[in-house]
Image: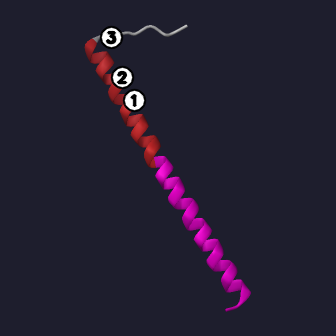
Amino acid sequence: MPVAMSVLLLATAAATAVGAATLHHVRGLRRQVSDLREEVARGRATGAHPGVPA
């Protein structure tokens, strides 16, 4: 196998790994944002206004 082909395969594998890690991270962030939105909506529905800790 030529060296150029090996380098191309290595670069493809690295890009795939980075893409998969990024996708996993973004999904986690979306879940956190969704949870925060739900928490804010519940707070507004109950009229609760907790103080900001000093």
Instruction: Tell me the CA gap for discs 2 and 3.
Output: 10 Å
Instruction: Tell me the CA gap for discs 1 and 2.
Output: 6 Å
- What's the mark number on residue 40? 2
Q: Quadrant of residue 46?
A: top left
- Furthest residue toward bottom: 1
| Above or below 22: residue 32 | above
Q: Where is mark 1, residue-wise? A: 36
Disc 2 secondary structure class: helix
Q: Residue at x 35, y 25 (%)?
A: 39
Q: Which amino acid, mark 2?
A: Val
| Above or below 32: residue 4 | below
**In the drawing, does residue 9 fall left or right of residue 37?**
right
Measured as percent of width and height from the top left, residue 20 is found at 50, 60
- Furthest residue toward right: 3
Circle 1 packing at 10 Å, graded few (<14), some (14-19), many (20+), is few
Q: Are marks 1 and 2 in contact (CB under 8 Å)?
A: yes
Is 20 part of what is drawn in magenta? yes
Q: Main secondary structure of the magenta part?
A: helix
Circle 2 packing at 10 Å, graded few (<14), some (14-19), many (20+), is few
Q: Earlier in the sequence, mark 1 or mark 3?
A: 1
Q: Where is mark 3, residue-wise? A: 48
Q: Quadrant of residue 50?
A: top left
| Above or below 38: residue 24 | below
In this picture, which residue range is highlighted in magenta? Answer: 1-26
